Amino acid sequence: MERLAGDMVNLDAAQSGAHTGALMNSPEELVARARGGDEEAFRLIFDRYSRPVLGFVYDMVGERSLAEDLTQETFVRAYKGLAGFRDEAKLSTWLFAIAKNVARESLRTRPREERKVEIDDPSVVELKDGRRSPAGALLDKELNEVVRKALERLDEDKRAVFTLKVFQQRSYEEIVEITGFSLGKVKTDLHRARAEMRRRIGPYLGGEQ
Amino acid sequence: MKCVDCLPSLEEFFDGEVDDKTAERMRDHLAACADCAEAFDALRSEQEMFLRYDRGLEVSPALWQGVRAAIAAADIEAAAPEAKPRPRSFLSSLREQLAAAVAVFAARPALASSLALLALGVTAGALWFSNPQRHTSTTPTQPQIADNNGGSARPAPTTTGETTTKETPDANPSPSEVAQVNIHGNGSSIDNGPAAHDAQSARRANPSAAESLTPNPRTNANAGRDETGGVVTFVDAGHEVAAEDPLTTVAPASLAEANLADAAAVLDPEDEAVARHVGRAQVLLRSIKNTRVAEGEGDLAYEREMARKLLAENASLQIDADADNNKTAQRVLKELEPYLNDIANLRDKPARGELRSIRERMERQEIIAALHVYDD
C-alpha cells in the first residue's frame, strides 16, 4: 500500500471528518480497521508513526535501548486503547500523548539527577574529546552530541515542549493536548528552553570565535 | 508596530502562532527594522541547525515484533480463564455466586425463575445431603459436571428441582460444584467452569453475533470482552430480553427475496470484518426502527455517533472489497451506506417525517432481516 511522505507535519493532513474513497489509508480509516482487529492496519499505523515517536521518546529519556522499550510500550498501550480513541482527535497527537506519559513514568522511576539551570555558567557542554572543529563550526556528528547533552540538561517539562515544537513541529495547540500544559506554560517553557539551548549550543555555532 | 511590540511576539510569529492581522503587522515591521529582522534570522538559523540534529535512530524490525508479541500476550492474558475462587465457607460462596447470577441475568425473567428453582433445588439437596441417613441413587440421564478437584463427573442438579444425587460421601456440595452448574438458555454460567468458558470462547470466536461498537448500557446480555480487555455487552438477537430494551425487542421481519438478502446470504462467512460491521449496523437500524424520539422520548445523539463511525468503517471496508474484487461484500456495504449516511445526518431530535422516510425504506427493503441472514 502507498505510504505518505515522512514529513510529520503532513502525516495527518489527510484526516478529515468526511470519508471518501480517495483517502487511502487515512488515519481515520486505519484506526477504524485496527479497531476491527485488522493487524495490517495497526502495522501501517506503527510504520507511519514509530520513527517520530521513537525520536520523541529518545529526546525525553536520552537512552537508545530504553527509548525502544518505551516506544514499544507506547504502541501496545495505543493498541489497547483504540476503542477509546476519539475520532475527532488527531491520531499523531494521541500517540504522542501516550508516548509522553510513558516517558514521564520512566523518568519518574529513575534517580533524579541534579539539573541546575545556570544561566550565566560559562562551562558549556564539552565535546567528548574536548576539541572543537578547526573552523569553529559544528560538524553534524559533533552537533548531535552537543544537542543531545544540551537537551538532557533541560528539565522534563521544557524538554517535552522544546522537542515537540522544534523537532516534531507540533503546533502550540497540539502541544497543549499532548502535554496537558496550559497554553501559557507551553509558550513560557518554550521560550525559556530556546534560551537555554541557545546558551549551551551558541558558542559552538557560527564561524571562528 | 514598534520593536518593543515586535520582539516579545517574535517566536510566536516564527512558529506561525499569531493571528493574521498581527502577522501582517510584524511582517511590515521586519521589512523595515534591521534589528528585529536580525533576531528573526537568528531564530531561523537556530531552527535550521536543530533540524540537522540526527539521533542516529532507526526503527528496527525487532521493534514491531516486540509490539506484536506484547499485544498477543496481552490478548492471551485477557482471554485466560479467571482464577478459581479460593475455598470459602459454603454460605458466603453461595451468596456471592447467587448475587452474580442475579446481576447477570436480571433481564431474563425466564432465567430468573429457573435460577430460583435451581436455588431451591440446591438448598433441598444440601439439606438432604446433610442427613446422615440419606438414601443414594443415581439417575443416569442427569447432566454431568466435572469435579473441581479432579474427581470423576457427577450428576449435576437440574433446574426442575428434581432430587439430585451424589456418589461421593461429602456431606455438602462444594462451592465449586454449585458454581459450575450451567444456567439453561444460553450456556453461560455463574462461574467460568469449563463448559461455560467454552461457550464464552465460542462467542468470542464468532464476533458476528452483534458485538456492540461500544458498551451499550441499554442491553443486558452476556458479558464478553472487547479488544482492550474491558467488558462489553453482546446483543443476542435470538434471546428473550426485557421489554424495555429497545435494541432487541422487535422480532426480525420476514425474509424476502430482496437484493440485499440474496447478497447477504452468499457472503463469505470468513469475511469477519464485514460480518462485524453488518452486525453493528443491524443493531443501529433496529434502534432507529424502535426509537420513540419523535414522540419526545430521548434523542438520537448516540445513534448518530454510531452511524458516523460505521460510515467511516463502511468506506474502509468498501475500499478493501474493491481491492479484493469481493462483489458480494461490495453490494452489502453499498446497500448499507445510504442508511448510515441518513442516520449520521439526523438531528438529535428529528421530526417525524425525517424518521418516517428512513423507517419506510427499511421496511420496504426489509434490511434488518437481510442483515440478520448474513449475521447468522
Image (tube, coloured by chain):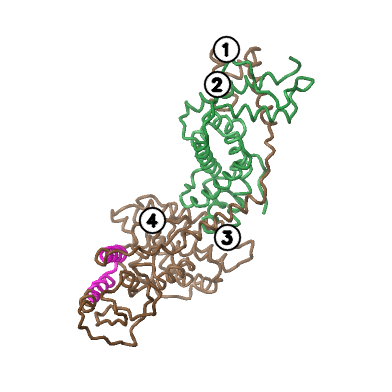
Chain colours: A green, B brown
Q: Is residue B179 left or right of residue A76?
A: left
Disc 3: which chain?
B
Residue corresponding to mark 4: B354
Q: Which residues are magenta?
A: B93-122
Residue corresponding to mark 3: B318
Q: Contact, CB < 8 Å: mark 1 with mark 3?
A: no
Marks 1 and 2: which is nearer the front? 2
Q: Amino acid at mark 3?
A: Gln
Viewer-nearest residue: B288 or A135: A135
Marks 2 and 4: which is nearer the front? 2
Location of residue B207 in the rendering, given as x and y in whole percent from the top left corner: 47, 65
Disc 1: which chain?
B
At mark 3, the secondary structure is helix
**Which label was assigned to residue B332?**
none
Residue corresponding to mark 2: A117
> Magenta stretch: residue A137 in it?
no
Location of residue A33 in the rendering, given as x and y in whole percent from the top left corner: 55, 56
Q: Amino acid at mark 2?
A: Val
Instruction: Give me the C-alpha separation between circle 1 and circle 2.
Output: 29 Å
Instruction: Give me the C-alpha separation between circle 3 and circle 4.
Output: 27 Å
Q: Amino acid at mark 4?
A: Glu
